[in-house]
Structures are given as C-alpha cells and as structure tokens.
Amino acid sequence: MKARKKKEKGVARATRGVTFDTGVLIGLERRHASALALLKACMLSRATITIPSSVVAEWWRGAHRTVLESGIVEPLTSELAEAAGLLLASTGGKNSVDAVVVASAARRGDIVATGDLDDVRELAHGLKNVAVVPI
C-alpha cells in the first residue's frame, strides 16, 4: 500500500490589505492578544499592512520601533490630506488622524483595523470599498 500524503492546510493569500490605526499600534506595543492575533493573521495571509504616518505621529513616544516593521509607513501627501479633510467635512468628524486612516484605506480598498470603532465607522460610512473591524 502506498502511503497517502497528508494535504497541508494553508492560509489563503489575502485579497485585501489592512490599514492600522493608532489603537492597533498601542495594542501591539502592549502585547494585547487581539492586536497580536490580528498581526499574526495578516502575516499568515500575507496581507499588506499600511500604517499612515499620522498614526505614527500620534503613537510614537520614542520606543518600540519594531512595531513599525510590521507594515509600510505611508507618507501624508497633500492628496491624502485633502481626502481626509473631505471625509471630516462630510461627517462632521473632528479627528484628523482617523480621517487619514480611512482615506488611506479607501485608496486601496483596505480593511481598517481600529481601536476606535464608532468614529472610524462613521468616517467610513458610505465608502463601499472600506471595511472596518475592531481589535
């Protein structure tokens, strides 16, 4: 009898990227289980992780640089800033960092991983290509 080869169950390649907000970076820095599980899932599925530079500015306090190695830090261009401003204007929102996160994700059709679910969902409301998930 021939030995049967076991089929390896692999994780499918991600079809969407993931944009991290400040809450995710804080969660990773503090080693919260939900943030670590999210990072592991992104790595296993080879999802592209984007971290807008405004998120880095809000989070950075001089330590834990390795957290930034998990993704691509996206610069704040005038086009991205304008898109974020339009989101704030259309929703009456006040948090420019959250608006940049949503505008950044909308460029690529990403999933937004956030610790600020209500505010980010409000900004993403009406954007069909952006999904928002809590950590």
Image: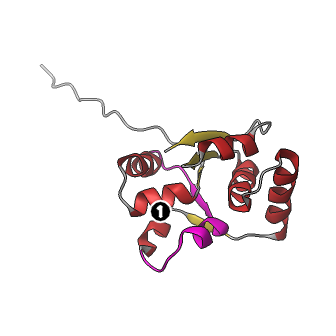
Tally of marks: 1
User: For residue 1, which quarter of the picture?
Assistant: top left
Q: Is residue 39 visible from the viewing direction of this image? A: yes
Q: Which residue is mark 1?
A: 70
| Kind of residue sitting beneath label 1 | Ser
Considering depth in this image, is 5 or 8 the residue closer to the camera? 8
Q: Is residue 5 magenta?
A: no
One can see residue 15 in this view: no
Q: Residue 85 at x, y = what percent?
A: 84, 59
Q: Position of residue 21 (x, y in %)?
A: 59, 56
- Residue 97 found in image quarter: bottom right
Task: Write down the quadrant of residue 83 in the picture.
Answer: bottom right
- Figure check: 46 above or below 65: above
Per the image, label 1 sits on a secondary structure element best described as helix
* Residue occupying image coordinates x 45% and y 67%: 67
Who's the residue at 87% across and 54% down the image? 86
Whole-percent x and y of residue 133? 57, 40
* Residue appearing at x 49%, y 61% in the figure: 25
Whole-percent x, y for residue 57 in the image: 61, 73
Residue in the picture at 50% in, 77% down: 61
Q: Is residue 52 left or right of residue 46?
A: right
Label 1 packing within 10 angstroms: few (<14), some (14-19), many (20+): some
Looking at the image, residue 55 sits to the left or right of residue 100; the answer is left
Q: Among all residues in the image, which is located at the extreme left?
A: 1
Determine the residue located farthest toward the top in the rendered image: 1
Please report the bounds of the magenta region as a residue range.
45-63
Q: Is residue 34 above or below residue 28?
A: above
Q: What is the image's colouring?
A: secondary structure
